[in-house]
Image (tube, rainbow, N blue to C red):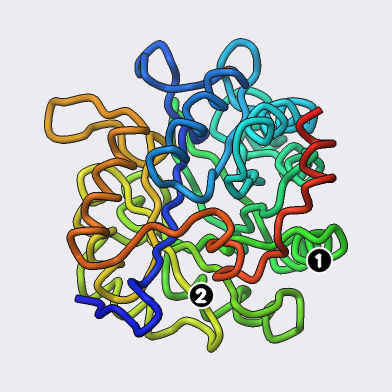
Amino acid sequence: MAKNSPFGPRKVIVTVAPTGGMATKDKVPNLPVTPEEIANDVVACFEAGASVAAIHARRPDGLATCEPETYSRINSLIRSRCDIVLNNSTGGGIHGDMIHQLDNGLWEIDFNERIKGLDGAGAEMCTLDAHTVCAHGGGRELLVTTTPSRSRWLAEQMKERGIKPEWEVFSIAHIIQDVTELIEDGLDEAPYFINMVLGAHQGFQGALPYTPKLLQSMVEHLPEGSIFNVSAIGPVQLPATVHALLLGGHVRVGLEDNLFYEKGVPATNVALVERMVRIIRELGMEPATPAEARVLMGLPALDRAAANAVAG
């Protein structure tokens, strides 16, 4: 268990991922999909102890999009009510605007649609998946093609725009290849925030399951100057995130990753955040406030004038 420092309990960043780009509301009634629903859930999770919101946008029909106007609307609704850190996805999802079929018959998550997530007003962070994998969902195999040149371009664009990358990795190879190279080339500044997604191996070729040894090994391969976050899919969300706390890391919960609170019991975003906050406190730690999370991640303090402008 992490011990308290002379300055008080260790602060843990709790990220909520309320929507994701896979589940649909017809099958998951608790899933927030409209800007208003997403904002209401994020604010409730902030009140429960979350300090970062990992946001995916949806079209009016509930399917995935990265349209800047939709992200801006979500961000403004959230920012008008709280100071949670806003992290917009450049992954998108496996349906809606995000997919197209190639001439060879294969399906791909469209990179040109994904990068629109960079332009949502108010984003302080954006996900950066510096790897190429194959996802499957909706009866399709979907290429997620982020080549080395695309990864570099994304990192350069984020640096130019003052957006902090959330480096999202599914395996050790993802850490030691493009992520480390781009960091060493100066395309991010320490501390590097690296989100390790575990248990996604049934939906993403090349992803790893959660085991204590695999998580420990991933942590050991992080670039110097990193802080790490753990996201885990489905029933491994709880053990993997608790393990992350014991290793000195930060955690993500939410319906993007896990639709059930326990076997047979549908989850809500607020319930998942509340449980994680209870566990953090039982372990002698404390959830970070958004202001504390910004310090831990090396983000600038929230510019109130800019925030008011985003909030409209």
Question: Front-most of 33 and 38?
Answer: 38
On screen, residue 129 versus residue 153, left or right, reads left
Residue 202 visible to the viewer? yes
Q: Residue at x 34, y 82 (%)?
A: 5
Mark 1, Cα crowd under 10 Å, few <14 / some 14-19 / many 20+, is: some
What whole-number distance in Å separates the C-alpha atoms at marks 2 and 1? 19 Å
The residue type indicated by label 1 comes to: Lys
Question: Front-most of 227 and 144?
Answer: 227
Where does residue 307 sit, x and y in percent of width and height?
77, 42
Single out the residue that lies furthest toward the left.
263
Where does residue 293 sit, x and y in percent of width and height?
54, 61
The residue type indicated by label 2 comes to: Ile
Q: Where does label 1 land, which residue?
A: 159
Q: Residue at x 87, y 63 (%)?
A: 160
Q: Earlier in the sequence, mark 2 or mark 1?
A: 1
Q: Where does label 2 land, which residue?
A: 175
